[in-house]
């Protein structure tokens, strides 16, 4: 029941699982970038980490592959307000240079495309 895909597909799964685990290992990093209008930031950091781990793992199961890919695309769309909030700089910018924060926006769309190309 595993998915037969090229190595970069498995890299994508590993990246989402790893990124999700970091929400539990280093939650303060994610709390710093959370927009103030998002309720219960601790819970949202936990849930977004859980979603990344679950979706990354679901990529590895043939029955859940397409659902996981659509879930990743939806999750990346949902994360766009956080990336826009980070552009304000200061605490929200997590100390990253402005050019890095700007490049993160098109990167989100590239990640969406990366997931989209594997849909069957």
Image: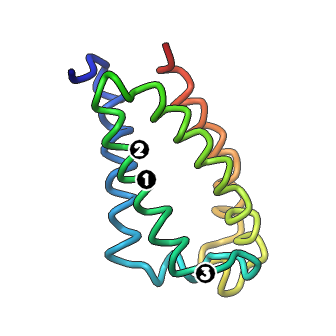
Say left or right for 11 vs 70. left
Q: Residue 50 sits in which quadrant?
A: bottom left
Residue that mark 2 sits on: 55
Q: Position of residue 104 (x, y in %)?
A: 64, 55
Nearest to the observer: residue 43 or residue 96: 43
Q: Residue at x 70, y 55 (%)?
A: 80
Residue that mark 1 sits on: 52
Q: Residue at x 68, y 47 (%)?
A: 77
**Which of the two discs, 1 and 3, sits closer to the camera?**
3
CA–CA distance between discs 1 and 3? 18 Å
**Which of the two discs, 2 and 3, sits closer to the camera?**
3
Q: Position of residue 19 (x, y in %)?
A: 39, 58
CA–CA distance between discs 1 and 2? 5 Å
Which is nearer the N-term, disc 1 or disc 3?
A: 3
Say left or right for 61 vs 85. left
Say left or right for 14 vs 43. left
- Name of the residue lying farthest toward the top: 120
Say left or right for 101 vs 75. right
Residue contact at pointers 1 and 2, CB within 8 angstroms: yes
Which is nearer the N-term, disc 2 or disc 3?
A: 3
Q: Residue at x 28, y 29 (%)?
A: 61
Residue that mark 3 sits on: 40
Residue contact at pointers 1 and 3, CB within 8 angstroms: no
CA–CA distance between discs 2 and 3? 22 Å
Q: Residue at x 27, y 21 (%)?
A: 3
Label 3 Cα crowd, 10 Å radius (few <14 / some 14-19 / many 20+): few
Nearest to the observer: residue 2 or residue 109: 2
Above or below, comparing residue 68 to residue 117 in the picture: below
């Amino acid at each position: 029941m595993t998915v037969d895909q090229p190595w970069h597909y498995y890299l994508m799964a590993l990246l989402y699982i790893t990124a999700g685990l970091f929400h539990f290992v280093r939650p303060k990093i994610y709390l710093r970038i959370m927009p103030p209008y998002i309720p219960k930031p601790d819970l949202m950091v936990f849930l977004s980490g859980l979603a990344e781990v679950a979706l990354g793992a679901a990529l590895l199961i043939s029955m859940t592959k397409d659902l996981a890919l659509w879930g990743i695309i939806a999750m990346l769309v949902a994360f766009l307000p956080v990336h826009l909030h980070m552009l304000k700089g200061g605490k929200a910018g997590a100390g990253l240079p402005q050019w890095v924060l700007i490049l993160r926006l098109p990167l989100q769309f590239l990640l969406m495309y990366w997931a989209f190309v594997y849909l069957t």
